[in-house]
Amino acid sequence: MTLLEISDVRAGYDRTTVLHGVTVAVPKDGVAAVLGHNGAGKSTLLRAAMGLLKPTGGQVLLNGEDITRLSPHQRVARGMAYVPQGQQSFPHLTTAENLQLVADGRADGKEAVAEALDLFPALRELSSRRAGLLSGGQRQQLALARALVTRPSLLLLDEPTEGIQPSVVAEIEETILSLAARGGLSVLLVEQHVGFAMRAAERYFVLEAGRVTSSGAGGTGAEQTVREALSV
Ligand SMILES: Nc1ncnc2c1ncn2[C@@H]1O[C@H](COP(=O)(O)OP(=O)(O)O)[C@@H](O)[C@H]1O
Ligand SMILES: [Mg+2]
């Protein structure tokens, strides 16, 4: 059963086409990983999936529904959440305020914030610290927590371990793996850490210059195949 189907999507910027007909499927309650070198089009793919970029061809289906023309806001309402590359939050707002901003206007906001903080207990102790003063790892945890406050059924994660010190990478890895194992959540994970991506993923897709050049079942058994496809 597929939750998100990105089908033959073409997209890019102005006159540059970056994605030349990309097809990627995310299994319901599972993790799909997209791997590829810098510039391959991974972030562009997530932007197209989230509706931040209009595809010039192809379709995006969520639970079988064609959402290609829906706005990002409408996709959030359908259970999608997106954590962009680079641990972005509002630097001048505190941890608590960053979470509250997402919770505002949601009937289940208070409960959802508490739940997100249960997953990242370290953030509780940092609730009054400005996001701009958090470490990279803490900011990534905050970005993940913010996404989870919307109680998504599909999480799009763009390189959650990028630029984070190794000790915290393991922690973030563990949280993502346990989230995925909990059920009720599917993840489209863009990662350059092949080991982590393959531990997490049920399906993998290697993206090169805007095309899927290799795909298959995930798991550590396929790690070597992926390393060879990426020449790493
Ligand atoms: N906002 C943008 N405007 C124009 N070109 C862009 C923009 N963002 C990315 N690109 C180009 O699109 C290509 C793919 O980029 P990106 O999707 O960020 O790759 P990845 O995430 O795999 O590193 C690159 O050639 C990059 O220079
Ligand atoms: Mg990127």
Image (cartoon, rainbow, N blue to C red):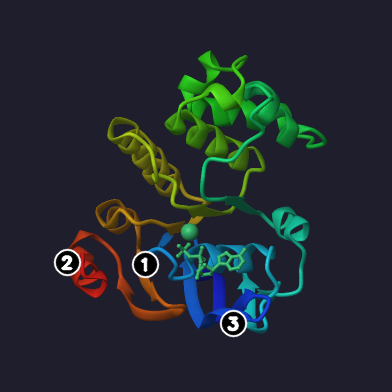
Going from N to C along the chain, the mark reached first, 1 or 3, is: 3
For label 3, the residue is: 10
Q: Is residue 137 above or below residue 195?
A: above
For the residue marked with disc 2, what is the amino acid?
Answer: Gln
Within 10 Å of disc 3 (Cα), the crowding (few <14, some 14-19, many 20+) is many
Name the residue nearer the viewer: 163 or 123.
163
Q: In the rendering, at what x and y percent does residue 179 appear? A: 45, 43
Q: Nearer the viewer, mark 3 or mark 2?
A: 3
Q: Which mark is residue 224?
A: 2
Q: Which mark is residue 115?
A: none
For label 1, the residue is: 36
Ligand 1 closer than 8 Å to label 2 CB: no
**Residue at 51%, 45% in the rendered image:** 86
Going from N to C along the chain, the mark reached first, 3 or 2, is: 3
In the rendered structure, are the residues bearing label 1 and label 2 in contact, judged by CB atoms less than 8 Å apart? no
Q: Secondary structure at mark 1?
A: loop
| Drawn side of residue 1 relative to residue 166, left or right | right
Q: CA distance from mark 3 to mark 2?
A: 29 Å
In the rendered structure, are the residues bearing label 3 and label 2 in contact, judged by CB atoms less than 8 Å apart? no
Q: In the rendering, at what x and y percent does residue 157 appear? A: 50, 52
Q: Residue furthest front?
A: 15
